[in-house]
Amino acid sequence: MALAAIDGMGRRLFAAPGRFLSVFVLAIAVILIAAPLVKIALVTISPQTIAAWGDVLTSRLSPNLFYKPLGNTLLIGASVAGGCVIIGGFLAWLVMMTDVPFRRTIAVLSTLPFMIPSFAAALAWSVLFRNERVGGQIGFLQGLGMEIPDWLAWGMVPSLIVLITHYYSLTFTVIAAALATVNADLVEAAQMTGASRRRVFFGIILPVTLPAVIAGGSLSFAGGVSNFAVPALLGLPVRMQTLSTRIYGMMEVGQTARGYVIALLLVLISAFFLWLGNRLITGRRSYATITGKGGRAKRFDLGGLRWPLCTLALTISVFATIVPVLVLTASSFAPSASALLSNWTLHYWLGESTPSIAQGLAGIAHNPDILSAIGITIGLGLIVAAAGSAVGLLISYSLVRAKRGFVPTAVSQLCFLPLFIPGIAFGAAYIALYGAPIGPFPALYGTFGLLVLAATAFLLPFAVQTGRAVIQQVSGDLEESARLTGAGFVRRLTAITIPLSARGLTAGALLVFVKIVRDLSLVVLLFTPTMPVLSVVAYRYASEGFAQFANAITVVILLISITVSLIANRLQAKSQPWLQA
């Protein structure tokens, strides 16, 4: 009876050809995405706070508040983009277009770094390379008697290395998918005319994959400039500031207006460079490589370079994926980073409170704060995955099935807007809007509801993209036939669309789950002691000098993230051509 009532209501509300549904999802997009951004902009131009713009941009404080962090941010973004394109493109070329041994192994390892939280790689770097400059424990290598220079232990260089090894899997994925479409006929035709390998690469392969190269570089740039965890862990101890860490600092000390201004400027910078990358791609149209004729891959014979290049590729992949996991795992058992491989103890996992160890902090199994954070984090992931998938499904359905017009275009633009917004800036926008009471609704700051709302909105682009991909595979004729028999919108959705697209929707939900479980940038401003999240708890422990606890918590996050990511990738295997290459 309940389903029939809901179906009847759905039939009445959605009887018009998508009109009500389009307006409904537009309202959702406005509430979740547009309203917080508008609010944060309005806050900064109110009479009480408009002076914050001058403080950030034109005062004597401006160099430290904005311009120096801006320079560091742009340097990180450009370096990460360039490094990721070189490494990811090199690995994609090896896997897709050469006869290098262990191609599948290299392909799988090359997709894993992005599954590992960036703060996990930063913590692993600290375990190995930390020196005595900022006090506390020294790292493993210095414990062996090696002298680690400051530039390798802290600041820009380690931040760049960690970020490049984290984001190169993005460019690998994008470029590998593009290389999979390069037809061997093009390459062989060039070789028959006497073109050298160098000529073929720069004259055919690189031009036709240029959109993927630019897209991968743009995504890596956006990731680098918006990343909070790595510069916070490796840069803040030596006072290296980026825009993300500066936002966090302003919000922490109560200078919210200045923090909001910097957040808006960071959004504009990220959006501009992503727009520029898209503009470069859409500015040319001569990229077609898939025709009506059957295609086949062309693999270059590497000759004597097969094994050296294979060794290099495996070394890069192992360093970026396996080494951080092993280092963090070992550190979670070791009494100190300098004694990484000796005197292991289970205290940080199973130990009870002991005054002589870690200032009396109990291990994970007996630490109520960490246990609470595990429960809240998993609950947050499950609810956001379900809510994101449900909202994403409705929005995707309206975009795929509705006729073109202003409302569907506005919905599409709004839903993908979070891709242009750094997580810490998005968190600041949610505090600005929902951190205070709105009419009869109470303030949500410090509540689980705010975490769910912010995370659902921030990850909505991934849910919508997944939903559009699977719904487009379901023929509209099936729903039209059901509609002619009297089935309402809810009935058609639950009986046809969802069952036929369940595999893809599940994979998308799992990826949303992973992204929020390992996210730090979004939740670091929304975190409160009463609403702990694992990633922020790990960051706090690391900042306070309890490295073993931070590493043990990070291992828990890694186990959750990698396990769920592999399940999701298994469900999406057909969309990853390099795994079948």
Image: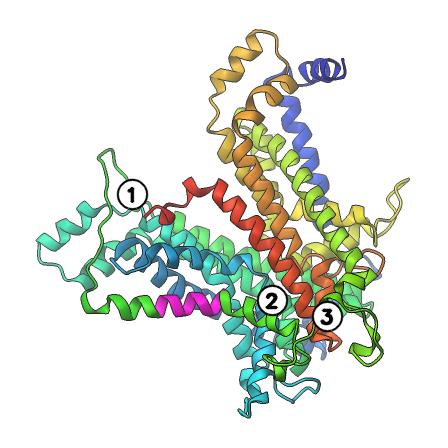
Which amino acid, by three-letter code, is at mark 3?
Tyr
Kind of element beneath mark 3: helix
Left or right: 363, with 305 as reference point? right
Query: How far across and down, in percent of the image, does residue 40 sit?
Result: 74, 54
The residue at which mark 3 appears reads as 348
* Cα–Cα gap, marks 1 and 2: 40 Å
Residue lying at the far top in this picture: please name it.
485
Main secondary-structure element of the magenta-colored stretch:
helix
Which amino acid, by three-letter code, is at mark 2?
Ala
Residue 90 is covered by the magenta coloring: no
Label located before the other in sequence (1 or 3): 1
Tell me which corner region of the image, top left, top right, bottom left or bottom right, holds residue 269.
bottom right
Kind of element beneath mark 2: helix
Query: How far across and down, in percent of the image, does residue 149 sit?
Result: 54, 89
Query: How far across and down, in percent of the image, does residue 72 sit?
Result: 57, 74
Label located before the other in sequence (1 or 2): 2
* Cα–Cα gap, marks 1 and 3: 55 Å
The residue at which mark 2 appears reads as 120
Is the C-beta separation of discs 1 and 2 under 8 Å?
no
